[in-house]
Amino acid sequence: MADRVKTGIDGLDRVIGGGFPRGSLVLLAGNPGTGKTVFSGLFLAGGVQEGEPGVYAGFAEPKDTLMENLSGHIGLDLSLYEAEGKLRILDFTALKEEALSTILEEILNAVQALRAGRLVIDSFSAMIQAIRDPIELRTFLQVVLGRIVRGMGCTTLMVEEVPIGKDTIGLGVEEFVADGLLRLNIGELEGRLFRDLEILKLRGTELEERRLAFTLKGGFKAFPPFKPKPVGEPRRFQPISDPSDKYSTGCMDLDMALNGGVPKGSIMLLEIDERISTLEYHLFLGPMAPEFALQGRGVLVVPSVGVDAEILRRVGDAYGATLEEFNRLITIVEVGVEEPGEGYPNVTALRGEDWREDLERVREVSRRLQAATGKPSLWIIGLDTLIAYYGEKICERILTRSAAKIRKAKSMLVALVKGGRRELAVRLSPAADIYLRLVRKHGCLLLYGVKPRTGLYAVEMDVSKGYPLPKLTPIL
C-alpha cells in the first residue's frame, strides 16, 4: 500500500485509504465560499501535528487577514506554528509584474529551509489573473510537479477557484498533470443548505464512495457513509432531566435541535426515507423509549412491519433495561396475530380485522399502563402496520382520534411514516406538533425539521456513553 499523508480533514481519510499519496499533487477546486481555504489550513495544521512542517503560498488574501480568519475557523493559532518554525506563510497578494522565477525561488527556498512535507498554493486561479502568460504558468506547474512534488517528496495542495456558474477549472491542463482532483460543492437539499465533497480523481486509490457530505461547523468535517459502531463497554442508559413543560428525547443533540425538547401532549411525525434501515431509524427511537421507561413511565409500541417483540427486547438490552422493566413498562401491540408469542407477557395481540374494536383494545391497554405507572406514557406507532391491515384512510382516522387522547393525557406520540408515503406524511402534518424527516445522501444520514423548520443535520452514531445515541452535526 502506498505511503499516505493524513489530510487533517475529519472523516475524509477513512474513504481515501488513509490520506493523500505522499509526494502527490492534489487540486482542490470549488466556487467561492465552499471551504477551500479552511481545508487548506487544516491540511497544513494536520501536517504540523504529524511532525511535517508546511508552507502556505498565498496569492488571494493578505497574510494578516488570512491568519486571523483561518485561525478563527479551525480553532488553532497558526501564528504559534509559524513562531516555532513549523509553518511558513508567504504573502504574494501584492504580485503585479514580478517575475515568476522570483516567486518560484521563494517557494523553493521556504520548502527547503523548513524541510517541508506539505505545501499549499492558494490559489493558482489568482496567479492566472496576475501573470496571464500561459507559457509561464505551465512552467510554474512543471517546476512545482517536478522539483517540489516529485523531487522533494512534498505533498502539495493547489487551490483552484471556480467562478459561479462555470464548470471549467483553471487553464484546463492542471487536472491532467495532477494526481488528485477534489471539488467542493454547495447547493440545496430539500430546500436547505447542503455541501458535498466530490473526489473526481485520486491516483492509486480505490474509492467506494466518490461524494461525501461535509460541514464547516467547527472547521471542516466530512461524513463517510453511515456505519454502526460497536459498543465497547455497555452501560445502563442515563435519562436526561425533562425541561419545563417538555419531554426529553433521550438525546441532547436532538433536544437542542427541537428548541429544548418535545412539548408535553405532543404528536411527532418521523418520516423515514426508503433507503433507511431499521437499525438506523432505531438510533432515534432507541433512546426515546428508555428515556420514558427508566423514569418509571410506560411505553406503548405498535411496531412497524418486520419488527417484533424479540427485536424490541434486543433494543431494550442495548440500553440496559432489565427483563422485569421491559415486561412491566413496555407494552407491545402486535397486529395480525391470534395470540402473543410465548415468553412475552407484555404483548397484546390484535387480529387486524375491525379497526374500531382494535383501537378500543389499544386504549384499554394504554389506560392500564398509565394506571400502573401513574404517569403519562409514550406511544410509538409504525403507521405502515396500520396501513397494511386497515388502509391509509383508516390509518389517518386512527391517528387523529389517538392524538386527542394523547394531548389530554399530556403524553407523547411518535408516528413513523416509512418510505414512499410523503403524501400521507404531508396530510397528517397539520395534526403534528413536530415533523422530522430522516433521509440519506451519499451514504450519509441526514435529519431535518419541517415543523419546526431546521437546517440539515448529519447523523452519526455515538457510543461513548456505553449505548447508541444519534450525534447530530449541523451542515453549515
Image: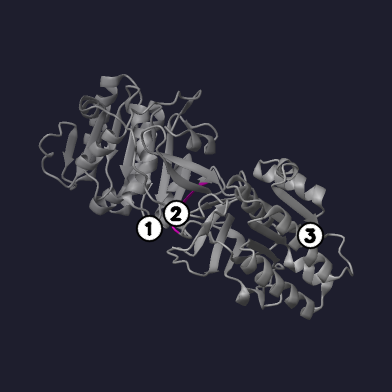
Mark 3 or 1, nearer chain start: 3
Using the image, tell me which numbered label, if any, was put on residue 60: 3
Marks 3 and 1: CB-CB under 8 Å?
Answer: no
User: Which residue is outermost to the top?
Assistant: 374
Examine the image and state in which quarter residue 275 appears. bottom left
Mark 3 or 2, nearer chain start: 3
Q: Which residue does the numbered mark 2 point to in the structure image? A: 439
Q: Is residue 162 visible?
A: yes
In magenta segment, residue 391: no
Q: Is residue 263 above or below residue 396?
A: above
User: What secondary structure is the stretch in magenta mostly built from?
Assistant: strand
In magenta segment, residue 444: yes
Percent position of residue 1, x then y: 43, 63
Helix, strand or loop at label 3? It is loop
Mark 1 or 2, nearer chain start: 1
Q: Residue at x 63, y 61 (%)?
A: 154
How far is disc 3 from disc 2 in space, using C-alphas? 38 Å
- Magenta-highlighted residues: 443-449
Percent position of residue 403, x then y: 38, 37
- Pointer 1: residues within 10 angstroms few (<14), some, or many (20+)? some
Q: In this view, does 453 lie to the left or right of 303?
A: right
Using the image, tell me which numbered label, if any, was put on residue 275: 1
Q: Which residue is drawn at 63% across and 50% down?
A: 42
